[in-house]
Amino acid sequence: MTVRRRPRWSELQPLLRPRKVPLRPTERRLATVASISDLRLLARRRAPRAVFDYTDGAAGEEISLRRSRQAYARVEFQPQVLQDVSAVDATTMILGRPAALPLVFAPTGFTRMMHTEGEPAVARVAARTGIPFALSTMGTTSIEQLAAAAPDGCRWFQLYLWRDRAASHDFVVRARESGYDALVLTVDTAVAGARLRDVRNGLTIPPSLSARTFVEGAMHPGWWFDLLTTEPLEFASLSRFDGTVAELVAKTFDPAGTIADLAWLREAWEGPLVVKGVATAADAVAVVDVGADAVVVSNHGGRQLDRAPTPLEVLPAVVDAVGDRAEVYVDGGILTGGDIVAAVASGARAALVGRAYLYGLMAGGERGVQRVADLLMAELTTTLALLGVTSVSDLRRDHVRLRTG
Ligand SMILES: Cc1cc2nc3c(=O)[nH]c(=O)nc-3n(C[C@H](O)[C@H](O)[C@H](O)COP(=O)(O)O)c2cc1C
């Protein structure tokens, strides 16, 4: 039987250590976060539903997106124990430049809709962390403004093929003049994917104040206050547009783009050229033959062709086909440092993340994005150490196995 006694004050006192509660609401919110999935939940509370769904959602039945996440869940690591992992090195080289970890912040359109701090906040975190940031053609910060916001960071510019080729060429010239390190051509966007959540939510760009969004606004006052009291939310490279994302893509993007356009771009841009949105080994070889320096195995985070190949699953075949002729990156569904380790062990030079940093941005602006970078770095180094690996460059395919059950 348990014998009870009255506790003494001297025993209780050391247990009573109230945690310091940060005064600023954003910091208070972020202090409770232990993972990017936690940040996603915070983001869902802070942003209006249509904005959260635009970020979180994908095309069609969202099968591609689900499969991408499931692929990472199927990864089983093969650790080697009793290795000296007292120092773990997460650094790597991306397009000839050192990076603090094998990670790139992917291009995302309309980023200031998630949080008014937008692309400059994401680019500053990337620069501080020591990883590249890719600015989208559909960004809400111009090529020049972004360069001024993160002058020392590694900056890539992502291009879509527009019907107006002269405008595409103008972007290339501006990116060169503003000192961008690489150009990314996204090739999986001939037409807009069917984003059903956006259709159901009636999302327009910019968000309009209908009766429904007005009620929504009352539930997310912080987001609306930010929207209405800062610089107007608009595309940096497009004149004012009122309509849905699908209408915008149909009007602006060129569905007739071919490999000849990639050859044209190769002529126009002398720096490193990345082709994003390749889903098969044959296409990867085709774009490398035309002069791509890197390919991103990607299905646009499941936002374009639903049921497209699952990037992590096709990655090894692409790496084998391309060999050392180009770097191979992968994206889609990456939410943890362990996912990045799985991607690199499967042959990727680096992983790109989109939603992961957007959840951080929505939840807490620049500080939220910083939290994402810190979490990914901490999770990555812990995973490497527990795998018995001291350096990212030592990761091999036999460190991972895809479970079938
Ligand atoms: C809200 C949002 C906007 C995006 N906009 C672009 C874009 O403008 N250009 C582009 O090449 N990819 C865009 N993407 C795709 C990302 O670059 C990346 O391929 C994708 O987010 C990777 O999947 P993940 O979000 O699961 O990490 C966007 C993705 C999201 C979530």
Image: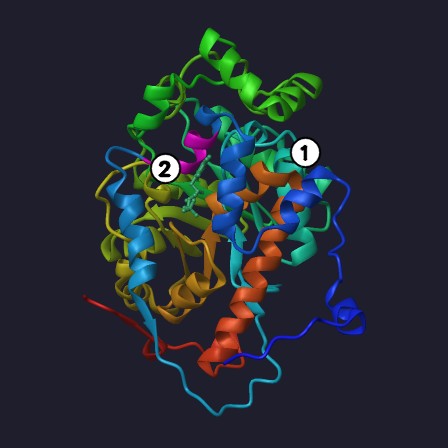
Compared to residue 287, the image places residue 118 above or below, namely above
Q: Residue at x 32, y 64 (%)?
A: 322
Task: Tell me the tag on residue 144.
Answer: 1
Residue 56 falls inside the magenta stretch: yes
How many marks the image carries: the answer is: 2
Give the x, y percent position of residue 66. Answer: 29, 47
Residue 114 locus on image (x, y percent) = 55, 31
State the extent of the magenta-drawn residues as a range. 52-58
**Residue located 57% across and 71% down the image:** 90
Q: What residue type is labelled 1?
A: Glu
**Mark 2 residue type:** Asp
User: Between tags 1 and 2, which lies in front?
Assistant: 1
Magenta span contains residue 312: no
Look at the picture and state if 360 lies above or below 243: below
- Asked if residue 223 is positioned above or below residue 317 in the image, the reply reads above
Quadrant housing the C terminus: bottom left
Query: Which residue is pictured at 31% across the width and 31% down the height?
Result: 190
SS category of the residue bearing label 1 = helix
Q: Which of 228 and 31 is in front in this view?
A: 31
Q: Dot 1: few (<14), some (14–19), or many (≥20) neighbours within 10 Å? A: some
| Figure quadrant of residue 374 | bottom right
Color scheme of the displayed model: rainbow
Checking the image for residue 156, the label placed there is: none
Left-right relation of 160 to 8 = left
Residue at which label 2 appears:
261
On the rendered structure, is 170 left or right of 314? right
Work out whether residue 178 can be spotted: no
| Residue at (33, 55) in percent of width and height | 289
